[in-house]
Amino acid sequence: MFRCPGQDQRFWKPEDIFEVQCPGCGGSIEFFKDEPKLKCRKCGRIVLNPKINLGCIKWCKYAEQCLGIMKKSDIKIHGSKSPK
């Protein structure tokens, strides 16, 4: 079975798992690089992943299958137009 190198944890670096501070309560939230958002366990606020990079959706023919929950056309990449 094909696995995307960007999503396959065997190719991840230590910095691909990181913590951010919740802007609501200051609690710690641990993100994996491919998680678009998480709910703070302390206050319940939804926090967006500040480091997410889904630039591959612009060119990868498996992007919709890989992301699963959304269509490529629904995702806005920072600094670019929606893919066609």
Image (cartoon, grey):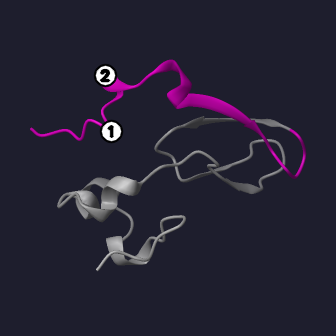
Does residue 12 show up? Answer: yes
Residue at the spot x=41%, y=77% of the render?
82
The residue closer to the viewer here, 52 or 47, is 52
Does residue 71 show up? Answer: no
The residue closer to the viewer here, 70 or 51, is 51
Q: Which residues are magenta?
A: 1-26
Type of the residue with mark 2: Arg
**Residue 48 image point, x, y percent:** 65, 55
Asked whether the residues under the numbered discs 1 and 2 touch, taking CB atoms below 8 Å apart as contact, a structural biologist would say: no
**Residue 37 image point, x, y percent:** 59, 53
Residue at the spot x=73%, y=37% of the render?
20
Type of the residue with mark 1: Gly
Residue at the spot x=62%, y=49% of the render?
49
In terms of secondary structure, where does tag 1 sit? Answer: loop
Residue linked to disc 1: 6
Q: Residue furthest top?
A: 14
Residue linked to disc 2: 10
Q: Callout 1: few (<14), some (14-19), or many (20+) C-alpha neighbours within 10 Å?
A: some
Identify whether 66 is placed above or below 34.
below
In terms of secondary structure, where does tag 2 sit? Answer: helix
Q: Residue furthest front?
A: 79
